[in-house]
Amino acid sequence: MATLVIVGNGFDIQNGLHTSYWYFHKQYNDQLDEYFMHFPEFFDDQEWSNFEENLGLFDEDNFRENSVFEPSMDDMIESSKYVNGYNDEIFQKTDELVDDIQIAFTTWIRAIDVKKANKFMEFPRGFKFINFNYTSTLQDVYSVPDGDVLHIHGKARWNVIFGHGKGNGNQSQSMGSNYDEPWFEESYQTIASVTDKFHKPVNEILENNREQLEKYGDVTKIIVLGHSINNIDIPYFKCILNAYPDAVWRNWNHKGEENDGVSDTHDKLMNLGVPSEKLFSLSSKKLGKAYPIS
């Protein structure tokens, strides 16, 4: 019999690590503000609490109108160099936007020092983990063998996978020709590719890891630790639910004065199909008593 543990960012936060997007915003707001003006969702999310999801809505017109000076029709009639120069500059500007955001995020993640974590519980031996975090908290703080941890979206030191889950990740390829301004078609395609580049390939990741997700054996218990169960991660949960239909679920989450993560995630798991009689949701504040440090 096996116990499978699904770990989300709430676990690292409960360990005292500064892994919430609030800290990312605090450190990189000034540096990245010129880029996020082209993502409307960031205007309503002043602390980037939904950072990855916000990347899924890129205002292409805003970027085109404010990032590069567009040549006039007279300029283009005079010489094709103006069109070529414009397309080249669009390519450079979009590259800078994507690279700077990706570098900032991975730099921030890699700077998280797990040695500062405050260990508050103990995991029984033999637990298997599906870790949605990039940190090595489980290995370095809780002494979980690396072979027992599947980092589904990569690890801080390599292959950090982040992004939104909107659309299918192929907007630029499916984008039709612009018949009004065909001379700018190359630049339109380049700008449209921004949304693609920030797309998290969940279906591909799931298929690459499906064999491991489904081979944990006789799983009798599935524990969810500090995972918000965002829409983008639902395919993983469905896969796990289908693979281990008889398992009971224990959902531990944060319950604060303003945010009841326990009820919220409980409802999400119910909507996914977890049977009510097999699902128990509790405040993560009680984890230390349920799994005390020996």
Image (cartoon, helix red, strand yellow):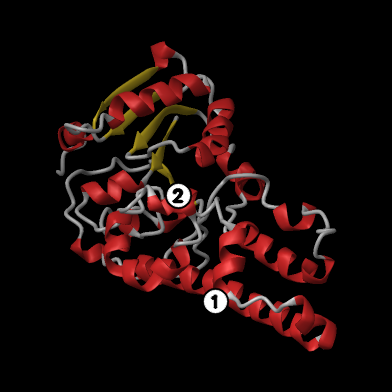
Rendering coords of residue 133 (x, y %)? 40, 53
* Snapshot quadrant of residue 82: bottom right
Residue 139: x %, y % from top left = 34, 58
Task: Check the picture and name the quadrant holding the N terminus.
Answer: top left
Report the amino acid beneath label 1. Answer: Glu
User: Residue 294 appears at what percent x and percent y?
Assistant: 14, 43
Where residue 96 is drawn, which disc sits there? 1
Determine the secondary structure under disc 1: helix
**What residue does disc 2 label?**
41
Q: Is residue 279 left or right of residue 181?
A: left
Residue at the image point whose x is 30% and y is 44% from the top: 10
Figure check: 241 above or below 292: above
Determine the residue positioned at 28% across, 55% down: 22
The vertical placement of 103 against 290, above or below, is below
Label 2: state its secondary structure: helix
Tell us which disc is closer to us: 2 or 1. 2
